[in-house]
Amino acid sequence: MKRFLLATALGFGVLLGAAWAQRAPSAAYDNSRKMSLKGVVTRIDWVTPSAFFSVNIQDANGTVANWAVEFGNPLDLEKDGWKRTALNIGDVVSVDGIPARDTRRQVLATSIVLAKTGAKLFTAKAKAAAKGKSQPAPRWPDGHVRLGPPPGKKGYWGPPSSTVLVDSTAGNISMNRDGLLNNILDADKVAPFQPWAKAAYEYRQRTLFKDDPYNRCMPPGGVRHFQSPQGFQFVEQPEVGRVLILLGGGDRNWRIVYTDGRPVGNKEDLVLAYYGTSVGHWEGDTLVVDTVGFNEKFWFSNGGLPHTESLHLTERFTRTDLNTLRYQVTVDDTKTYTRPWTGGWTIQWVPDEEIQEYFCEENAESTFIRN
Amino acid sequence: MRRRVFQLGFLLACITVAIPAQQGHPLTGTWNGDWGASPTDRHQLTVVMTWDGKAAKGVINPGADSATAAVTLDPVNWMVRIEADVKDAAGKPVHLVAEGKMEDMGSYHRTVTGSWKQGAVNGNFKLTRD
């Protein structure tokens, strides 16, 4: 019986850990509070999407408690020149940060100082914009714009200019990078919701995205993979009539966009999927992609926008120059919204690099161990 | 035997938590539960609900004796109303009206609980999304 209970607890533990694997910071941490810690490092988890270390903190009574400190994505930290060896077990550190919303002993670091040297660790470099002055978009011999790297070069599409999707007619709406509104009364402006959809959106906002399937490492379907800092890459294969979109976030998934003239098909005939079924065609220098056949198991954008299986996305990818991709998407889901609506952002080219590894579950494991 | 119980326990624990939620219209899906006039007088109940973009409807106890229900959701307070013409145990047509509140809206296993009036019988019901 003991083993049964242990097994049950273990099973739940693994998945509760997964539930935190890539939770939006605004959902996990309470921005209205700050705290400082000083203690000895006992463990370092250099894992994506967020690296953690653990510290033993001793209070005035001599009681020791172990705290987890989240301090950034190791892929980004490595780009900034940091290595996991910058910190070692046994080091004493002072941490300023934002505590978890719940009762767990966890903090999102805003400052980490190594006591023995006074050095400030894991600071981010200011992100350099793509180097040099703007160059024209590269082209294929037939004149089409290339969506991938120029011949002989490397690169991928990186961070988006916006990580939220709102109706372009909405005007200015104040929300954070996770899509959390500063004022819930602005919900009406975000999209032309049907009443149930507005209520569902507000519920997700009020509950700080606690039910977001992405928290459980489910794929970021819809437009959400283009809101990921891990970026994506196009692989154009005109000889077989398709474009592959390789995704850096969401566990390195991919989409296939058929450009061979086939119809997108009827939803009823499709296996419903996180990334749907896509066909594309060129309109001048713009790749236009129609996607249907989405399932209802995910949130298609940061912020908790709802959708149904009737969701139809029309995405327009325009490489305006070497370093800039304009992304525009029209959302058509008559079971959720009162009319089609459009939003978008731009995406910056990251030259001379490949998409790096990113596996949500890697963090889930360390989260499980830590808790 | 103990090892099997151990393995089964682990598997069940994983499956229970890992089921991905249905994130579309909150009514959509198959709901199971029961209704009755007292804790000892219960009737198994299955309602399959769909949303066509304008109205929701339900099929009560799909099969030979199924009934089609009009279903409404008031998203302000997540109140659900189910209304249908069904047959009682004697085969006599009766009208049913059920009203309940949806709880834990974001969960795959969200529930609706409330009152169930079928003909002259007053009772309660609970449905859990399957």
Image (tube, helix red, strand yellow):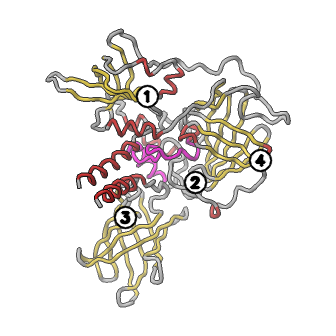
Per the image, label 2 sits on a secondary structure element best described as loop
| The disc label shown at residue A273, or none | 2
Between A168 and A316, the one lying in front of the other is A316
Give, as a three-letter code, the residue at label 1.
Answer: Trp
The residue most toward the right is A142
Q: Gap between marks 2 and 1, in whole Å?
A: 32 Å
Q: In the drawing, what numbered circle is on residue A46?
A: 1
Mark 2 or mark 1: which comes first in sequence?
A: 1
Instruction: Please name the amino acid that badge 2 sits on.
Output: Ala
Disc ID at residue A241? 4
Q: Is residue A19 visible?
A: yes
Q: Indicate the chain on which mark 2 is placed.
A: A
**Callout 4 crowding tier (Cα within 10 Å): few <14, some 14–19, many ≥20:** some
Residue A351, how many percent across, how many down? 66, 24
Residue range (magenta):
A195-224
What residue is at 72 percent from the left and 35 percent from the top? Answer: A147
Find residue B128 and name its label: 3
- Element on which disc 3 rests: strand
User: Which quarter of the rendering shows the N terminus of chain A?
Assistant: bottom left
Instruction: Point out residue A39 in the picture as x, y percentages from the top left corner.
Output: 27, 20
Residues marked 2 and 4, same chain? yes
Three-letter residue code for mark 4: Gly
Q: Secondary structure at mark 1?
A: loop
Mark 3 is on which residue type? Thr
